[in-house]
Image (cartoon, grey):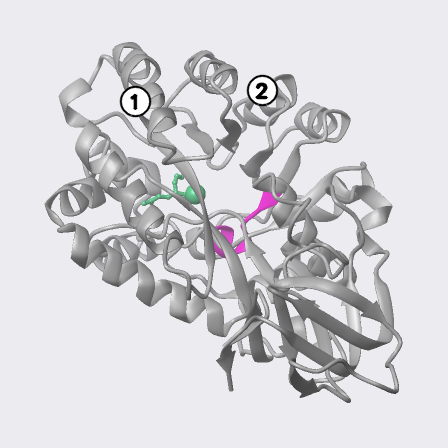
Amino acid sequence: MNNNLIITGARIITPIGRKARKGKEMDQLFDENGTIEITDGKITYVGPDRPVLPEGYKLIHAEGKVVLPGFVDSHTHLVFGGFRPDEFIWRINGDTYMSILQRGGGILSTVKSTRKESFGALQKKTEGFIDIMSQMGVTTVEGKSGYGLDRDTELKQLEVMQAINLDKNRKVDIATTFLGAHATPVEYKGREDEYIDFLISEMLPLIKERMLAENCDIFCEDGVFTVAQSRKLLQAAKEMGFGVKIHADEIVSFGGAELAGELKALSADHLLHASDAGIEAMAANNVVATLLPLTAFTLREPYARGREMIDKGCAVALATDLNPGSCCSGSIPLTFALACIYMHLTVNEAITAMTLNGAAAIDRADTIGSIEIGKYGDLVILDSDTPNVLPYYTGMNSVEKTIKRGRVVYER
Ligand code: NIG
Ligand code: FE
């Protein structure tokens, strides 16, 4: 089956551009009825319906349906061993995320399970998540390492993602991020600086040489890694050609957003406690503010100031943060609902945040994230004539078909 597809009669809704849309631009979408043509996996026509169609294309009639760019979930930790349901219940009963981590649980508990897990079992579990994501319209996901915190297990996580990317029938592309600085492994307890040096001198060059990750990330947080340690790692990563990202201001206000501005990072993520100066630094330096409302929801924390960030000129992206601890959910529908209900994004802004701005947060805005000639034919068809169902079907799926590079990979 070739990757040639024509969709006619669709209500085509998309942001336009090859970089993140900031501030007021986020609300402005192309919204017209017509045809999309995909040839060999790439978009070759977007415009009014035509009387005569070329031959050799699969045809989908999409009258009365909204067609959007495929969703880009630009922040997840989707490769991990085990689950942590008991911690979730402890937290509901008043324990805190950081105190569980400090007692050797949390991320460190998943590190133990991931070190033990076989490559095959990890790959199977990851593919299971990818199937679920694809059903909710995701065509590209970012995936982080960070549950090995040693040479071999970090490589194992990245190699699982690489193996999935090599499957030519894959439903979702994975943008890979090295998060060796997710926590300090027990072997380095009290020697955080030495651990950062190990990541810089041994891990980054190895990962670069094997082309296992595009980006580098760090958990910059009180009690995890300091701003100075984060600056050191990310500067080194940037010099080696990695895109840089930061888990910033998730638990307390810590200067992560400011650092992201200083480093001109691709994105700063979480930002529940980002300061005013941090918001200004992101807007001024084109850092995508990646908001993860499912994490705030599950941690029972206040949501990030999404409305204010957009009003102050930031480019905001939305992602799920799927992981076994702070947020064991990859729900795209619930992310839309929380973003619109509690962070006060308009539906148009939320669409931009889940498509083009997500693509920019993984440095892929030139090839995905919008429905434009030359980009990959990654699309979502909704079972409705209005995009308002995205937040309105609260936590329920409105996706009828997902299309990956011109192939229908999910059909309701
Ligand atoms: O994005 N905060 C750090 N990392 C993840 C959680 C990882 C975990 O709890 O396993 C996050 O929230
Ligand atoms: Fe995360």
Q: What's the CA distance linking mark 2 and mark 1?
A: 22 Å
Q: Which residues are magenta?
A: 290-296
What residue is shown at x 81% (from left), y 43% (from top)? Answer: 23
**Relative image position of residue 218 (x, y in whole percent):** 42, 28
Q: Quadrant of ligand 2?
A: top left
Mark 1 Cα-neighbour bin, 10 Å: few <14, some 14–19, many ≥20: many
The image shows residue 341 at horizontal and vertical percentages of 67, 63
Q: Secondary structure at mark 1?
A: helix
**Residue drawn at (17%, 58%) of the image:** 121
Answer with left or right where residue 280 lies relative to residue 82.
right
Does residue 331 sit above or below 165 in this rendering?
Answer: below
Q: Which residue is mark 1?
A: 203
* Residue 222 position in % (x across, y down): 41, 24
Name which residue type carries label 1. Answer: Met
Q: In this orientation, does residue 148 appear?
A: yes
Residue placed under numbered mark 2 in the picture: 259
Q: Is residue 5 above or below residue 77?
A: below
Magenta region includes residue 287: no
Q: Tell me what residue is drawn at x 62 percent, y 73 percent.
A: 4
Specify the amino acid type for callout 2. Leu
